[in-house]
Image (spheres, helix red, strand yellow):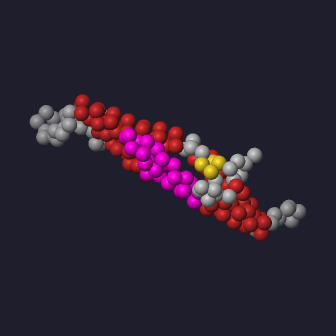
Amino acid sequence: MKTNTINGHKLKTAISIWETRQKVAVGMFSNSLTYYQGEDPGDPVAAAASIAKANTAIAHLLTARARYNALVEVEVHGQQIPLLQALVQIGPAGQMAKMWQAAISPNSRTSYARDFRNKDEIHPVSSLSQAELISQAEKAAAAAAELRAAISAANMTEVDLAVIGLDVAFLP
């Protein structure tokens, strides 16, 4: 039964279902262009219509998701921001956490814990102590985790379909 509200998780699921339908229709189209005697040739015109229907639904759902992401707000670092902004920030936040983690890993190319066999060899000196590296890695990981948690919680927010301009007909 279709309702008049939707959340971010349901939007993502609806998009995924329509993308699967589109891929199946593309396969049906390709398979219907040639056939062997005695086989059902399929209908390329019907398959093309299914592709067009799926593409239209995906476009409407992606537009609705963009509106949803701009409308729903999350709290990050004590500040209210649009979900869209949190989604843009999560990639760089995760990258920063990985960079700090790599800096403290002894096997990393960017690590300060380098192994030198010759004690007389000149080598770089760490600009930060191991404790400071760990502290920065923990802060970056916490910031990324806060964004992920806020995004997950925000995607549970129900909004009216009319508010994001989505016709219930596009829901699977």
* Residue 60 shows in the view: yes
| Quadrant of res 93 | top left
Q: Residue furthest top?
A: 131
The answer to whether residue 6 is left or right of residue 44 is left
Image position of 57 with respect to 82: above or below? below
What residue lies at 72% left-to-right and 60% top-to-bottom?
Answer: 25
Rendering coords of residue 86 (x, y %) = 44, 48
Q: Nearer the viewer, residue 128 or 80?
A: 80
Q: Which residues fall within the magenta stretch? A: 63-86
Image position of 54 with respect to 143: above or below? below
- 5 inside magenta stretch: no
| Quadrant of res 107 | top left
- Number of numbered discs on residues: 0
Q: Nearer the viewer, residue 160 or 134?
A: 160
Q: Residue furthest right?
A: 38
Rendering coords of residue 87 (x, y %) = 46, 49
- 69 inside magenta stretch: yes
What residue lies at 24% left-to-right and 37% top-to-bottom?
Answer: 112
Image position of 163 with respect to 157: above or below? below
Q: Nearer the viewer, residue 63 or 121?
A: 63
Rendering coords of residue 138 (x, y %) = 33, 33
Rendering coords of residue 55 (x, y %) = 65, 63
What residue lies at 26% left-to-right and 35% top-to-bottom?
Answer: 133
What residue lies at 73% left-to-right and 63% top-to-bottom?
Answer: 50
